[in-house]
Amino acid sequence: MNSTSPVPSGDHAFPSGQQSLTTDGKPWSQRTWSYQFIPCRGIYFDLKRRIPLYSSDWCFNFKPNKLFQVFSATLRMYFINLMPAIAYLIDMNDRTDGIYGINEAVLASALAALVFSLFSAQPLTIVGVTGLINLFNYTDYDIVKDHGINYLQFQAWMLIWAAIFHFLMAIFNFCDFTRFITDMTSETFGFYVGVIYIQKGIELLTREFSHSATDGWLSVVVAISFALTVYWVEKIRNRGFGPLWARRILADYAFVIATVFFTGFVHIPGYLKSADLTKLPITQSWKPTINRDWVVDFWNLEARWVFIALPFGFLLTLLFYFDHNVSSLMAQARHFPVEKPAGFHWDFFLLGVTTFISGILGLPAPNGLVPQAPVHTESLSVLQHVSSDVPDRDGVVHPDIVKQDQERRRRLREGGETGGSVDNQLLSCKIVRTEVAEQRLSHLGIGLLTLGTMTRPLLVTLGTMPRALFAGIFIGVGWSSIEDNGIIGKTLYLIRDPEMTPPNHPLNSLRKATILKFIGIQWFTFAIMVAISQTIAAIGFPLVIIALIPFRYYYGPRWFTPAELSLLDSPTANAPGVMVSIGGDLSRVTGEGLEVAPDTGFLGSLGFNDKLNPVVQGDGDLDRRKIE
């Protein structure tokens, strides 16, 4: 290759490990219903794929060039996992009359991290206490407290039933149906989560005004300043100021830096300290918040309430089915060069185990963390500079191609230094991911650090943190789910001045009425979920988001053409390592391949054979002509 030849394109530019993944058992298109529900089929193949890789999940960490990255990811994720969990706990503590405290939140987070780091098929997925279990728990509390029922006993049975439903869904391979989750559903859910989190942050701030206006307004300043600091420092990674390694360190530790700074900020002597903001309430180390044993006496609950807890457990299972699996999908998305296969069925079974233990111990049940899971994978990703003309697939380039490009750029610079001509465009760079440090040590480290937080010195340290800081965490985490959400992007496109819209914008080929119809469905579903969440029926919101999955599958091909769907929607499960666990054949799901929906026979946009000839209209859309 001469000094100015382009870097090879095609599949050679991308990690080869992903392309070698194969699906065990029958692919989706060849399955019958009897085969689909063979007990433990999915669990068996998940374990068959991952057990041979288990030793490499540990040994990989001891390579010197990876140890610092794993350590950095561990420390970063410890803060990003623990601080939001405590923020949710503050709200839960206020709304359940103090039943849940910091020790319950910390122990639940540590339990999940330790179990999933040691036994899960995909240790990249971060599991912990979420804001939605907070919403679910205090709504349950409001329902049962008026009946004189012991809440922890009722919650224990709710989680026992939920664990049973988890086991059944994992055994009978229901995780295969996550293949039908698309952006229409996941974007709506993510937008809902973001808005609810921001709402919780504002609610925490309003409570600070009950002490004095000074405390209230200082709390607002601290919360907003914290959220903005984390936001802007994390953006440094993609700016051109300073070397990449320095920007990476600043971005990775933005959350840590802001937490330490604003904790100290409110203790500065003088007017700030005299404001006396409310601090995080702490309890004795290693003990429950209220005077009880760790094991809940669930066997003393009246029999009829045991069975009343059953539908509550089923609704919680639906929430975890969606929330946990989507977080796992996001941790293994196509823009991360993850090469080891997923294991959805086994991991969901394992989630049932942690749900059961949480019920027995009176803990808030942990599940997959949507914001944190992809951040963990991002922290473990190896970033490199490559020339702007190097082809990438969703920001991923093979390490060998990076080395070739670096050699090419070196020769170009040498040519310029000796008087040769240099194309400045070839020397311009972009940041790509080349590999992910796939291992278990970072997740295990998160669990051990979290468990250590229950010791007295760390509890006392946490007790110095103002509640306003946790309101800022709510706002920051919520905004991260909203900023790049597809609903916002499409809505802004509709109201943007056409003269200011880039001529190559992908939505330009669609009618605005079509875009409005698509996001109208999302906005309507979002509005229903938010409305339900403000009532005693809030525990029913999982039904709404789950119902959107079959709605999208059945009505999507009837309301939109394949060409429209290819621009407006895409499967959430789209990475090779993900598809091997849920049957492969992604092309048959949402209009990306042979058929849009088997029962309609509508033509898809790709992969046509001789019997499937697309009919292209004048505007480039595919006609909804039936297959002959």
Image: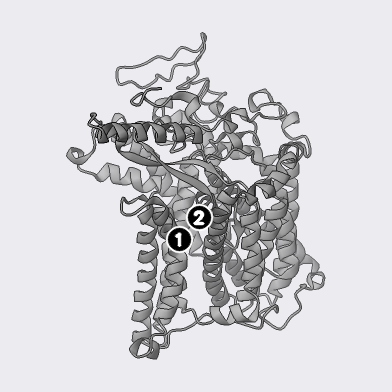
Residue 204 pos. (x, y %): 45, 74
Q: Residue lying at the far front in this picture: please name it.
A: 418
Answer left or right for 108 relative to 470.
right
Work out whether residue 146 can be spotted: no
Return the x and y of residue 603 as percentages of the image width and height.
48, 19
Separation of residues labelled 2 and 1 (CA atoms): 7 Å
Determine the residue positioned at 56% across, 71% down. Answer: 89
Q: Residue at x 72, y 39 (%)?
A: 46
- In terms of depth relative to the viewer, which is nearer, 495 or 481? 481
Q: Position of residue 581 (x, y in %)?
A: 66, 36
Quarter of the image holding residue 271?
Answer: bottom left
Q: What residue is pinned by disc 2?
A: 371
Q: How far across and down, in percent of the image, does residue 268 sit?
A: 38, 85
Q: Report the amino acid beneath label 1.
A: Val
Where 106 sits versus 275, above or below? above
Question: Tag 1 or tag 2, which sits nearer the N-term?
Answer: 2
Residue type marked 2: Pro
Relative to 507, does residue 283 appear above or below in the rendering? below
Characterize the local packing of mark 1: few (<14), some (14-19) or many (20 or more) Cα atoms within 10 angstroms: many
Instruction: Answer whether residue 280 is visible to the viewer in this image.
Output: yes
Task: Farthest residue to the left: give it.
Answer: 499
User: What number is the disc on residue 477?
Assistant: 1
SS class, disc 2: loop
Q: Give me the residue at 78% from left, 72% from top.
A: 295
Q: Are marks 2 and 1 in contact (CB under 8 Å)?
A: yes
Q: 300 left or right of 148?
A: right
Q: Quadrant of the N terminus?
A: top left
